[in-house]
Image (cartoon, helix red, strand yellow):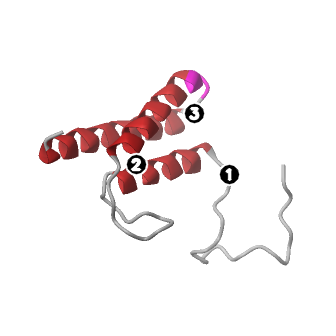
Amino acid sequence: MFKKTKGGNKGKDDPQRIPEASFSNLILMLATGVYASLGLVPDPLGKEMKKDFEIAKSTIDLLDVLKKKTKGNLTKEEEGFFLNVISDLKMKFAQINKKEGK
């Protein structure tokens, strides 16, 4: 959709470089939000640790909808990656909720 410009691109090793648009990067972006909402990693924007279980659950539910809508349209690698990420997120959500007594 948007063209990359020669002068404006950052190098591959630059941590501030914008990742390529891909299904895997979309899943990673959403998963990072869940991990941050569970207090497992700092919030990528605010750099602070805070928990928000409603946002975590909502994002996991969104990933479940995406899983249903993409069924049969992913490569084996994409599907395997996606299923592993969703499983890990659900397991961590359940563990933290149990630990927190919610």
How dense is the environment of label 3, judged by Cα within 10 Å: few (below 14), some, or many (20 and up)? few
Please report the residue visible at 76 percent of the width from the left and 73 percent of the height from the top.
Answer: 9
Residue 56 placement (x, y as % from top left): 38, 43
- In this rendering, the answer to whether 74 lies above or below 26 is above
Amino acid type, mark 2: Val
- Foreground of the two, 101 or 10: 101
Residue at which label 1 appears: 21
Q: Quadrant of residue 73?
A: top right
Residue at which label 2 appears: 34
User: How far apart, in angstroms, are the residues tagged by discs 1 and 2?
Assistant: 20 Å
Residue 76 placement (x, y as % from top left): 51, 33
Task: From the viewer's perspective, tell me whether residue 14 is left or right of residue 86.
Answer: right
- In this rendering, the answer to whether 44 lies above or below 100 is below
User: How far apart, in angstroms, are the residues tagged by discs 1 and 3?
Assistant: 16 Å
Task: From the viewer's perspective, tell me whether residue 71 is left or right of residue 37.
Answer: right
Residue 88 placement (x, y as % from top left): 32, 42
Find the magenta span and give its range: 69-73
Residue at which label 3 appears: 75
